[in-house]
Amino acid sequence: MAADAEQIIAALRASGGRMTGPKRAVVTALVEAREHTTAEDLAAAVQRKHPDVNESTIYRNLHILEDLGLVEHVHLGHGPAVYHLREMAHHHLVCESCGKVQELPESTLRPLARKLKAEYRFTANPRHFAICGRCEACE
Ligand SMILES: [Zn+2]
Ligand SMILES: [Zn+2]
Ligand SMILES: [Zn+2]
């Protein structure tokens, strides 16, 4: 699941994106984030290292990175969305009872996505929302 901040920054440059300090700081914070990170957590992480960067700049850059397709948000439940680097994207199983989150590789839902495309002409984006249910412990 490791992605390298420098690699992503290089890809961003190669695609013609301007790599400003705040963008670099947001990418680095996403690479370093261990837990699922909301925009608010991310802003706090960036500001710990770069107290001079204000919150609105961080949010703006997060959305620019999302528009560029380098960052994605996911809804794990009723709370605020969490953010991932596209390179580190995966699917989520969320337990409705205890809130436990499990990660699945992207390949897991590929057969379903293929079926939806073939039979319903629907291009699914199963990464946007988690799959809800019950974990083993709560069953
Ligand atoms: Zn995740
Ligand atoms: Zn559970
Ligand atoms: Zn959304």
Image (cartoon, rainbow, N blue to C red):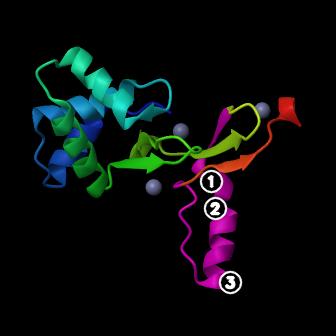
User: Distance between the Cα atoms at labels 1 and 3?
Assistant: 19 Å
Ligand 2: quadrant of the figure: top right
Q: Quadrant of residue 95?
A: top right
Question: CB of mark 2 within 8 Å of CB of mark 1?
Answer: yes
Left or right of 133? Residue 106 is: left
* x then y, percent, for residue 6: 25, 32
Left or right of 94? Residue 46 is: left
Instruction: Specify which label sits upstream in the sequence, 1 or 3.
Output: 1
Q: Which residue is mark 3?
A: 119
User: Distance between the Cα atoms at labels 2 and 1?
Assistant: 5 Å
> What residue appears at the point 53 percent right and 48 percent down from the top-left corner?
75
Left or right of 23? Residue 101 is: right
Q: Which residue is mark 2?
A: 110
Q: Secondary structure at mark 2?
A: helix
> What residue appears at the point 16 percent right and 18 percent down from the top-left corner?
51
Front: mark 3 or 2: 3
Magenta stretch encompasses residue 116: yes
User: Distance between the Cα atoms at labels 3 and 2?
Assistant: 14 Å
Q: Secondary structure at mark 3?
A: helix
Left or right of 99? Residue 60 is: left
Write down the region rendered in magenta.
101-128
> Which is nearer the eye, 134 or 3?
134
Amino acid marked by disc 2: Arg
Instruction: Check the image and report above or below for 35 versus 126.
Output: above
Amino acid marked by disc 3: Glu
Q: Which residue is mark 1?
A: 107
Give the mark count.
3
* x then y, percent, for residue 17: 14, 51
> What residue appears at the point 67 percent right and 51 percent down from the top-left corner?
131
* x then y, percent, for residue 41: 38, 27
